[in-house]
Amino acid sequence: MKVKQLDRTGNLKSHISINIVADAIDLNHIYVYCPICKKTRYSCKPVLHIHGSGGNLNNRLESRSGHCENYNSTFNIAITDDTIRL
Ligand SMILES: [Zn+2]
């Protein structure tokens, strides 16, 4: 069984809202490198979170619940001209 991290207030998970530009998008998925997740406590390698794109490659804003392991996160994902189309 995995042990969840406790935050400073002792809650199992704190809620966090993240505004971020998607790194990449294709017809199936939106790819976002998470600014708060770490692969392990000893690694600072970025963790990729993958969301469904609904077959839409247009610039837009998507609000999704995050896939962060240690936080209840909401991602406000901007798909912009900086987002790579795969
Ligand atoms: Zn995350």
Image (cartoon, grey):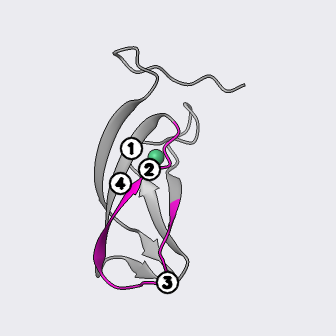
Residue bearing the label numbered 4 = 75
Closer to us: 19 or 41 = 19
The amino acid pointed to by label 2 is: Gly
Residue shown at the point (46%, 19%) measured from the top left: 6
Question: Dot 2, how many residues are within 10 Å of its Cα: few (below 14), some (14-19), or many (20+)?
Answer: some
Query: Is residue 63 placed above or below 68 in the rendered structure?
Result: below
User: Disc 1, disc 4: CB below 8 Å?
Assistant: yes
Q: Which mark is residue 66?
A: 2
Q: Quadrant of residue 28?
A: bottom right
Residue bearing the label numbered 3 = 55
Distance Cα–Cα, label 1 vs label 3: 24 Å
The amino acid pointed to by label 1 is: Ser
User: Disc 4, disc 2: CB below 8 Å?
Assistant: yes
Query: Is residue 9 placed above or below 67 in the rendered structure?
Result: above
Q: Secondary structure at mark 4?
A: strand
- Label 2, ligand 1: CB separation under 8 Å: yes
In reply to whether residue 59 is colored magenta, the answer given is: yes
Residue bearing the label numbered 1 = 73
